[in-house]
Image (tube, helix red, strand yellow):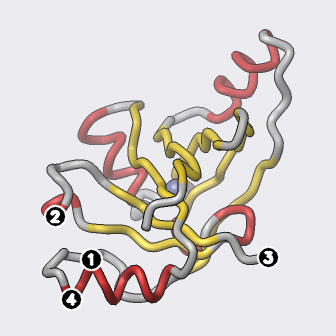
Amino acid sequence: MLKKIDHIGIAVDDLEAVAATFAALGVEPEFTEEVTDQMVRVLGFHVGESTIEYLQATSSESPIAKYIAKKGNGIHHIAYRVDNLQETLDTLQAKGFQLIDQQPRQGAEGKLIAFVHPKSSNGILIELCEKIA
Ligand code: ZN
């Protein structure tokens, strides 16, 4: 069901500082993108087959702003790649998992994403993600 780690989402309050840190290592970001649905700006680095996504809130209503206010910069979620996101969500729901998103929505890099509620995954926020060819 879970194919690989698609990306790790890290909440930060300053993307420019992150970019500067990676630049000092000689590493340029693969992409920068605003995901309006999640109210975040994303700075993405491909690392092997996975991606590290640094997320900065664009609004105080963003889940990332709320996370930072509570915990500061830190790992926000782990995203697993699945083949068919809607089917996976239906399966999880049938098994009694609590979902934040019953239906896929738009994530970075054109992917479909959905979040599983931490109450159903040991307090860790899990994202499921399908790559659209
Ligand atoms: Zn994510």
Residue in view at x 59 percent, y 72 percent: 130
Q: CA distance from mark 4 to mark 1?
A: 11 Å
How would you rate the neighbour count of disc 1 (Cα within 10 Å): few for under 14, some for 14-19, many for 20 or more? some
Percent position of residue 33, x then y: 74, 57
Secondary structure under badge 3?
Answer: loop
Q: Quadrant of the C terminus?
A: bottom right
Please name the residue that numbered disc 4 is placed on.
94
Q: Specify the amino acid type for callout 1.
A: Leu
Percent position of residue 105, x then y: 54, 81
Marks 2 and 1 in Cβ contact (< 8 Å): yes
Nearest-to-viewer mark from 2 and 3: 3
Q: Residue furthest top?
A: 24
Please name the residue that numbered disc 2 is placed on.
120
Q: Specify the amino acid type for callout 4.
A: Ala
Secondary structure under badge 1?
Answer: loop
Q: Specify the amino acid type for callout 3.
A: Ala
Q: Quadrant of the N terminus?
A: bottom left
How would you rate the neighbour count of disc 4 (Cα within 10 Å): few for under 14, some for 14-19, many for 20 or more? few
Percent position of residue 23, x then y: 81, 18
Q: CA distance from mark 4 to mark 2?
A: 13 Å
Vertical order, 38 against 98 (above or below) = above
Please name the residue that numbered disc 3 is placed on.
133
The residue lying toward the viewer, choosing from 52 and 70, is: 52
Q: Is residue 2 left or right of residue 34?
A: left
Quadrant position of residue 90: bottom left
How would you rate the neighbour count of disc 3 (Cα within 10 Å): few for under 14, some for 14-19, many for 20 or more? few
Please name the residue that numbered disc 1 is placed on.
99
